[in-house]
Image (cartoon, rainbow, N blue to C red):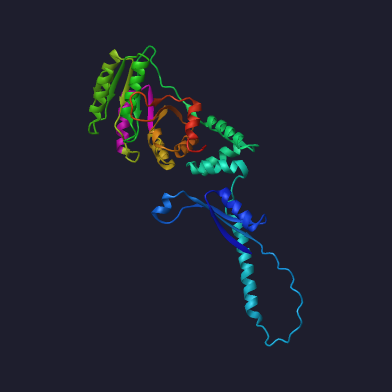
Amino acid sequence: MQVKKFLAPSLAQALAQVKEDLGEEAVILHSRQVRGQGLLGWLRPPQYEVIAAKERQSPPPKPKAKPKVPEKQANPEPLAALEEEYQKLGKLVEELKTQLPQAPFTGHRLEVYEALIAAGYEAALAEKLLTACGEQETLELIWQALEKELAKGLKSASLPFPEEEPVVLALIGPTGVGKTTTIAKLAALYSLKHGYKVGLATVDTYRIGAVEQLRTYAEILDVPLEVALSTTELKEALRRLRESCEVIFLDTAGRSQQNHMQLGELKSYLQAAEPDHVALVLSGTLNSQGARQVLASFGQLGIDSLIVSKTDEVASFGPVASVLLERELSISCLTCGQAVPDDLQLPDRDELVNLCLRGVRR
C-alpha cells in the first residue's frame, strides 16, 4: 500500500493533488487544517494537510529466465516477518479510514464551506447552514441559498420610542466596548433626528474621565446629565429627568464577565432604574468563546437586544455571527467608528446578512 501526505492552501487543491498523484482509486485517510511552526508559521495562512493511500498495483509478470543453479538457499524467515508487518499495516489503515473525519461536502458546497471556516465560522454551524442549502447547480445559487439561511437565523430589533410616558434605555457590557460613545450617538439620533427631549444619566464613576466624557457630549447636544453614586441617587436622578425628558439613556460602568460581585452590583442598579429596554454592547472583535462568556454572564441580567460595536475593526464577522445564530439574539444597532452621531447603524435583516458574509464571499 502506498501512503502519501499532501499540503495545499485549500482542501479542494489538496484533493486535486491526491487525484493527480494517486489516481481515482486513492483513499483519504486523514484531512486537517495546519499551520507552520514558530511565529512565522502562525502569521502565514493555514494550509490543508491530506493523507491518502492506494493499493500498489501488481507488477507485470517478468519474462521467464533460464533456470540457474542457486548458489545458496534463501532464508524464508525475513520474508515471512515482512509479510506479517504488511498485513498489520493494512489493518491499521482500514481502522483509520473508519475513524478519521471526511470532508462533509464536495463541489460548490465544499468551496463555500471552506470560505466559512476560513472566516471564523464554527465547523458545526457551517455544515448545518450548507446542508440546509441543499445541492445547487451553480456556485451563485449556493451563495443565494446561504443568504436565505442566514436571514432565517438573524433578527433585528427596534429600540423603543416614547408614547405617553418617558422611556429609559440602559446600556450594559464589558469594559472597553464603547458604551459611552454609543450612548452619545443614540442621544444625538433621538434628539437631532427625531426631535425628542433627551436626558443622560450615568453610574460609571469608576473609570477615570468617564463622567467628563459624557458631560462633554451632553454639553454639545445641550441635554441634561445626572451622575449617581448609589442606587438611591439613581432613582432620584431618573425622577428628575422624567420631569423634563422624553428619552433617558443610562450609562453603566464596564464590568468583567468573570467578576460576579461587579455583575451583582450592576444588577442592583438596573433594578433601581427599572429601564424599559436593556441593550448589551458586544464587541464584534471577540472570538466565539469570548462572545459566549459575555452572553452567559450578562444574559442573567435580562437583555432586550444587542448592540454590536467595533464592526469596522474586523475583517470577518464569523466568530461572533456563529454565536448570534446559535442563540437567535436580536440586534438593534451596529457601531462602526468613533464619529458621533454618524458611525451608528440601525440594521435591517439584509444588512445583518451582509455583515455576516463580510470576509466570506469575495
Q: Quadrant of residue 246?
A: top left
Quarter of the image for residue 71 reads bottom right
- Where residue 356 sits: x, y (%)? 48, 34
- Examine the image and state in which quarter residue 136 appears: top right
The reply to whether residue 236 is in sight is no
Magenta range is 261-281
Give the image location of residue 130, x and y in percent.
58, 39
Q: Is residue 167 above or below residue 329?
A: above
Answer whether residue 248 is visible to the viewer in this image: yes
Establish if 44 lies above or below 94.
above
Is 233 on the left-hand or right-hand side of 168? left
Which residue is located at x 36 percent, y 18 percent? 190
Q: Is residue 25 above or below residue 221?
A: below
Q: Nearer the viewer, residue 116 or 253?
A: 116
Give the x, y percent position of residue 257.
35, 38
In the visual, does 322 lie left or right of 167?
right
